[in-house]
Image (spheres, rainbow, N blue to C red):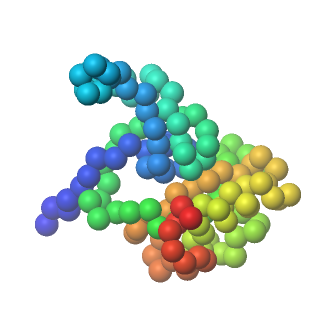
Amino acid sequence: MNKKTKTVHLCPQCQSDNVQIKAWVKPNQGNLFADKINYGEEVGWCDDEGLPTFVKITEINADAKVIGFQVVGEDGTAQEGKIHPDMDASLCIYNLTQARKMLSSKNGNGQWRLLTIWTGDIEEPIMMFKGNPRG
């Protein structure tokens, strides 16, 4: 059985699909798209992290959606592979506001990063919020 997939643009750092890229358009022709985008060559923007990034294109399960966020150790630091001390457990999923608060907490010390959690990433996740994950 073949799974259906969809193509998405992601932030390679946090895996968020809430990204922006620059594109050339023709403003006198209804903003018609004018040229291809050289992915990996132009800096884009991750709205969830609030940082510049090189946007990547990937295929994911067609039913996948963002369900929340975690804060995990930055690669190459002493915290790599760990969850943030303010998280209750590795199965816990937070909304973006909660995750950003962890990143800016006294425990934040620059060794932590945002991680977007998609459906299927964590078996039996514990939701630590209600409503919109980006709320």
Report the number of numbered marks. Answer: 0
Does the image show residue 80? no
Can you give x and y, in whole percent of width and height, for residue 58 in the image?
A: 34, 44
Compared with 28, 102 (above or below) is: below
- Which residue is painted at 77% across and 54% down in the image? 104
Can you give x and y, in whole percent of width and height, for residue 80 in the image?
A: 68, 52
In the rendered structure, the answer to whether residue 109 lies left or right of residue 114 reads right
The quadrant of the image that shows the C terminus is bottom right
Q: Determine the image quadrant of residue 76.
A: top right
Can you give x and y, in whole percent of width and height, for residue 38 in the image?
A: 37, 23
In the rendered structure, the answer to whether residue 111 lies left or right of residue 23 reads right
The quadrant of the image that shows the N terminus is bottom left
- Which residue is painted at 38% across and 63% down in the image? 65
Compared with 51, 49 (above or below) is: below
- Which residue is painted at 57% across and 71% down in the image? 93
Outermost residue toward the right? 106
Can you give x and y, in whole percent of width and height, for residue 17 in the image?
A: 43, 49
